[in-house]
Amino acid sequence: QRLKIMAAAKKKTTLKTKTVKGTTPSSSKKEEEEDLSKLTVKQLKSLLEKKKLPTDGLKKDLIARLKNVIRSSSLKGNEEEEAAKTTTNKRGKSEEAPTPVVVVREEEEDKKKTKKPRLLSSPPEKEKTGGSETGAKTKEEKKPIPILPPNTTSADKKAAKNDLDDVRKTYETTMKRGACEDKVVEELIDEGFLERSVWPQILASTSKSEHPDENTALAFAKCIVHKARNMNVPDAFATLSNSSSGSGSGIGDGGNEEGENALALKMLVETLTNVAFENVTKNSPEVAVEMTTVVRFLNVLMNALENDMARKSALPLVSIQIWKAREEKRLEMELNSAPVDVQKKWQKLMKKEAKQEPTKMQSRRNSWLTNLTTVFLDTLPVARASENAMAFCAYYLEFIVDLLSQLPTRRFVRAILGDANIFVKANLTINEMRSDEEGADGNVNLLKQLLEMAKDFYDFEVDDHTGDALSEEEMESRRSKVTHAFQRLLFKHWPDELKELALSSARMIETRSSLTKHLKNLESDQLRKLCCDQLKLASNDDSNDVEFMQKDQDQFLIDVISFHFEKRRSRREMVNKLPLYPTEDILWDESLVPFDDIKKKDENNNKSAKNRMKSLPLALPKLNLQFLTFSDYLLRNFNLFRLEATHEIRDDVSDAVRRMQPSKDGKSFRGWARMAMAIAKDDPRQEAIEFTYIGNPNVGEEKPSKVRIKMRLNFSATRDDVFKEWDELKRFDVVFLVHAKQDAKHGDAKNVEYIRGAEIIDIRDEEGVPANEGFPEQLKDAKVVKAPPPPDAMDEGPKKPSGYDRVFTLEVDCAQYQRDLETFDGDVARVHEMYKNFNCVIRRRPKENNFKAILACIRDCLNQDMNAPEWLQDVFLGYGDPSSASPDALELEDSENNKKRTKIDFKDTFLDEAHLRESFPGKKIVFDSATPVPPFKVTFGIDEEDASSNVVNVESYVPPDPGPYPEDVKNQNMVRFTPTQVDAVKSGVREGLTLIVGPPGTGKTDVATQILHCLYHTNPNQRVVLITHSNAALNDLFQKIMIRDVPERYLLRLGRGEEDLSTDKDFSRTGRVDYMLRRRLELLEIVEKLAMSIDETLANAAETCETAGFFWKSKVLALWERFSVLVLNNKETPVSHERIRTQFPFAKFFADVPRGYENLFGDPSEANVEYAIRKAKGCFRHLVEMFTELEECRFLELLKMPKDRSEYLLTKQAKIVAMTCTYAALKRSDFLDVNFKYDTVVFEEAAQILEIESFIPMALQRAKDIDGHARLKRVVMIGDHNQLPPVVKNQTFSKFCHMDQSCFARLVRSGVPNIVLDAQGRTRKQISKLYSWRYKKLDDLPHVSTEERFQLANAGMAKVAQFIDCSSFAPESCPQPHYFQNVQEAEYLCSLYQWMRLCGYPAQSISILTTYRGQKHLLRDVFKARCDSHPLFGPPASISTVDKYQGQQNDIVLLSLVRTKHVGHLRDVRRLVVSLSRARLGVYVFGAKKIFENVDELKPALKTLMNDTKLDVIKGEVYGHISRKVEDAVSNDVKKSFKDSDEFANFIDSCALEYKKAALEHLKNQQQQ
């Protein structure tokens, strides 16, 4: 049967190809189709009989119309057919109902001749109706309808019965068209079409064990694809399970609901795979549209494996069952070389099918990928002529890329693609399309790029079955084995024709050209025998292979053989040869770096009509849930980060060049730009740009080792502040050299000829004086060495630069220089001439200009085979048991832990005994004393199956006395941690991976501080690296650590932002060195005092740290040991309070204690010996700490250079090193150079850190110690993936490539165990319940119910949280893409702010938020006009977007949602969570209720706010003087409601006048008094 289908497909394709290659252009075809649409069915039939028009197009048009006729006649009753002349679809559009029933029977008779018998288990097909009207009606009446709940009215029943008709009509009339606009689908989704219409019908069909019909399945697929790709919904399937329970479908509830949902989705997927099976032999625009929908849906499904329902439907499609569609010979070869587990799986499948023969539906499902591939190869030749065909081919290749990029989907799919020779066939076809007379357009190039990308993943260095990464040596070994077997085969059968090929070395035949050269010696029959019969790389029975052999047999067979035996490109070499700076070819290549909508619109105006097609996928890598290997992980992140940086560079360069306004010849500029400078070339005596050094290539490389140029600039015509900014550029800053002119080849305004990046090495004036202190006095490779300055000039300090001339020494990218040489065929003079033609240099802001260092860091990781620790590798890549890296799992695996118990010293985590008992609910607490007092050491059982694991043993201990002085006593923890927070601390201090999800206000920072505190005290010799996304968060956490019991000398803060710490202390490396120097002098003075108190002759004991150390060992320690033996541990003489006081050897030194030495050991009248002993030991502890700190200062005496001191401080002294993720990436090479080591990484704000920026902090050291053990022991990630993800400026990279995915969110999605903090203390409960539904459990801390500020109502407001409806306002405006504004909403919000200010609210307690940048600017203008200068109002605390305000909070938040037509990006629930969780006491949301009330994703949050959407205020209440409680009812007499913004504004004006009168009267009375 399959062969028949293939033969029919081949015949169809041949006919199609002839038609495409004919003389009729595509434009005339479209005009013909438009003319046909104007004819009646009878006219079409007569034309068809007379053969006046092409048969193919008429049949398609007739079939399309007859489908509507049959459907309308079958769905309506006879009475409705006679009475109704028009039909109204679901969207309210009236259309004429087609009524020519005369042709129906004749057309149906034609169908019966060719139609195959319907399968018993197959879904009902849309074209399978009876041969008459009665038959059609009977057939339709048997279709499933929704199962309604009891007590349903007749009207509801009638509406439900027509629901299925509405879904079909909506799909036919609105969604089925190939040109269906995305906004139409979005409107349907906003109206709840997916959750309330489509999905209930699918569930109803499933309840009757029937598959959904094709139209319903395709409508479902389009909605899911749009939600996942266009609306950026993280989980497009999430709302289905929520909607099913209330949909009226009658499907069970509770645990059964999940199973029914999974079954419904599985049957829907089978319907879609059946669509692919039926369309193999078809070739029409409708087929291309349907197949595009199927492919895109399957792609979304395969990328949603973290969803249980989606995974159950997706994985069977890529299991070993799909190998049933393979040819027997190839399958046999594959199984013989496959691992044992794959062979066992195949045998098990065969046994199962031997017992029970698979149904035809299952057989169709097994061949789904083969069918899709066949349709793709049939469609590809006509892709250029058809917009729909091009879309299908592009999305199919994108689907193949995604299948091959994940191990679960790659394992068995790769063999299917190899059997089909898809890469060879597609490459031949695309090359034909590019070489024809029309040339290659952008879409054909896109297909080529997607194909190359799929080929790269097909050849990736990974074992498909084991998932192990293959090194270059292993890949070469595998290739050598295959090559040698191939050579032996050739020598056996063709010793004469291919003797040279058979006997040559493997390296001689590793290229396609060498293989082609030798294989051309064979005849056609010999090639066919070699390729088809012996190598089995192609098949004589495969119609597709036969078709390609008929075109050019020799070339096709040679390409197939070459594809399988040529050497693949090394990705590491490709990255090393890739320039790190973008050039003009990449900057303005829309297929690689998509333009913003504004620029894209202008760009499209210049494109021809053939290139203006629907949106297509891009040949860009994606960050999925799983990665093949660490090389794959690094490569994808490298490419995406590079392109994202390119997008930002393009904006800066375009803006600077536009402002400069270059002339047509590029010799002058009419404008100026702050970030750009013209390169003057008016001095004939010297070149403005010249090459100064070109280094020889390193061993094994072709590119130069170093390329440097000098550039001269004159700043005489520049403003002083701008000149100063150029002089302040630092070493390794990046600038861009541009050749700008009008009518150039590139640029947004066609004003850039070419552009190159370079790194600043040095800036000097004409006399050679450095521009700033960041540059050395003399470069290392400088040839001229200036004489030292005279002694008299030494005291003048460093010489400052003079004049306006500056000489820049720049280092060019060596890889780019080599590429330029290759472009100009090795002509060095032409390359140098190109560089001399640069007429403009552009700089960028330092914070945005660190891309080069980060890219170099990723490339270094790739070259060094940098991996995560072994215990973390599988989990990090997304494979294996997600819990295998958790602390519990790692402790279970430890064979040395025979007792299976773990002890943790919690230090000051617990405040008292009751707190400890509360922290372990359900556990049996066993104390070691009757009166336990913190701190506690707690012992837990590891094995949950062990009965003793429920027992928690608690050991209470008395910490040593800190010392006699107040500074010896450290701050203790005062936070009463919840049980979940204690669980997070417990997990964080143990070895392994800990994920802590912290909803808003749950104390994430406090938990992180406690983890760091416990880690330092329990593992004092280990080092912790603290990473955050922003400097603000890092400073917040660092300041909390500073006040805890962690010595100041062990804290180090790296990077910028340290100056924002609210302390006078400097925690940078330089600041810490200065602190240690000062501290050394202070300690030596104290030691001198101690020495003089012991013996006045020991005054020289405090000269240096070394002498102090000798004094400690020889005198201080000896005295203490003597005191211990004679007094404390004397068995002959009992210890007494008096003996301790009188014989204490350091009594004179401690004479200055606060209470005096007489009371140091306690009240003499009480004579408490134990207290006295403890105090004596405390005094000695003070001395131990002093000499220990002094010993740690000794390196200052040995190391004299500041650099050596700072490196020692980093690598030896500091115990907690804090930095941002960006700084870690910038300085990774420096950390490796100084052999930096650490044991723990703690991430705060982990959900806002990019994927690669989460990996680099784990790779700041060598992966293993000298003994081979992994140095990194703990990784603690704290964040909230339910809030906003990392910021990615280019929306394409964010939505399409998932670049905004954080490692934290990915690990949570992968099922890694995580601890969710479950008690918040930020906001009142009425507000917290608006977002608490997004978390497993989120309650309120006790103080939320007890504190007065949370109990009292908001003055002047009837409610503490409210949605204020603005539906009656004018719709929003959009002057620029994504720049939405709503004037009336902004005015209404401003009026509410004014009312609150009149009620006495402080301005700093109110924040104004909005979801769009345009509205933020509008709000600022409105507030500036109405409030900023007004004495009664003033500006609010902040006016910001929600995205920028994340991490901040305030008492009152006024939120503007802006949109009135579509939901927009607020559909992303994460943005709504951030919006509603910023307020502590009140949140007031302004928006259009009619838009947001139907959005299923937002319903749980907004349904309580939308009970009453009128603005209610209470006159007479004053902020700070209110006794009304939140729950108190407000009478209508004191409450005033508003529906209109103008009415409320007039009310504010009148209240302001009253306030003014009252204020004047008050002043008047005061003056009279």
Image (tube, grey):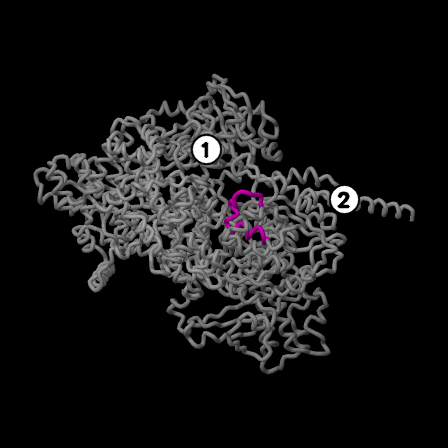
Q: Residue at x 50, y 24 (%)?
A: 679
Residue to which mark 1 is pinned:
600
Q: Secondary structure at mark 1?
A: helix
* Number of numbered labels in the structure image: 2
Between residues 351 and 1026, which one lies in front from this camera angle?
351
Kind of residue at disc 1: Lys
Where's residue 1200, x and y in %? Answer: 53, 47
Q: Which residues are magenta?
A: 1457-1477
Q: Residue furthest right?
A: 1568
Looking at the rendering, which quadrant does residue 578 occupy?
top left
Figure check: 128 above or below 950: above
Where's residue 901, x and y in %? Answer: 44, 72
Left or right, 116 with respect to 1164, comes to: left
Instruction: Return the mark for residue 28.
Output: none
Q: Secondary structure at mark 2?
A: helix
Q: Does 1460 lie within the magenta span?
A: yes
